[in-house]
Image (cartoon, rainbow, N blue to C red):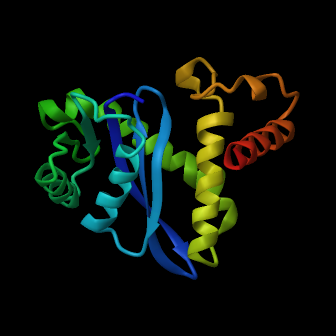
Amino acid sequence: MTGELTGDETYVKIKKKNHYVFFVSDKEKKIITSHHVFEKRDTLAAIKTIHQTLLKYPQKPENLRLVVDGNPIYHLTQHYFSLNKIPFELVQVIGLQNKTETDRLFRSYKQVTDCLNRTFKQEAYLTMNGFNSLNTTNGYLTLFTAYFNFLRRHESLNWQTPVEISEIKDCPHMPAKWIKLLELSYDSLSA
């Protein structure tokens, strides 16, 4: 993973009520580094999701940057981490048009996040028409993240998957790739 992260939240329906999926992703690697579903779109939700990502680093990158939208919860999140000696640069890209130099410089980060949200909505969530429980939603997000990181070919990566797994690469079709990925995850849990 790099130190160039993007964060965003989108809504999902669980039992016909809005809940919020928080994603953090690595802009360069095109991987989802963490995701979580919360009942509220608040600072605690942002802190927990970013914390999940930070746990994946052996040590915090020197120049950690998080690019997000204009939601004020991220300023409080940055403050929380700063108080806990985990400072990072926070960049907020606001709106759909470049009104500031910051917007112009970091618009591509926002576009990566928007693309992730669209992919989640189009390929995953819309076919489900909502979820019946929080557990079902989190399970589905885990499968979506596995697909996004290990199986889905990304145009911006010359049609490669973000994380290449040699054991999966030669599988003849997507069902075989899923089976192999599940076997590998089971083997890693058993070890």
Residue situated furthest front in the rendering: 191
Counting from the top left corner in percent of width and height, residue 179 is at 83, 43
**108 above or below 188?**
above
Which quadrant: the C terminus? top right
The answer to whether 126 appears left or right of 180 in the picture is left
**94 above or below 71?**
above
Residue situated furthest top in the rendering: 158
Q: Residue at image x 74%, y 48%?
A: 186
Counting from the top left corner in percent of width and height, residue 124 is at 64, 55
Task: Evaluate whether residue 130 shows in this view.
Answer: no
Counting every numbered tag in the picture gives 0
Residue 21 versus residue 62: which sits nearer the camera? Answer: 62
Task: Evaluate whether residue 132 shows in this view.
Answer: yes
The answer to whether 69 appears left or right of 149 in the picture is left
Residue 191 versus residue 112: which sits nearer the camera? Answer: 191
The answer to whether 26 appears left or right of 181 in the picture is left
Residue 27 versus residue 85: which sits nearer the camera? Answer: 85
Tell me where residue 178 sits by quadrant. top right
Tell me where residue 167 sits by quadrant. top right
Which quadrant: the N terminus? top left
Tell me where residue 16 sits by quadrant. bottom right
The answer to whether 86 appears left or right of 83 in the picture is right
Counting from the top left corner in percent of width and height, residue 80 is at 16, 57
Q: Residue at image x 86%, y 37%?
A: 176
Q: Residue at image x 47%, y 54%?
A: 35
**190 above or below 150?**
below
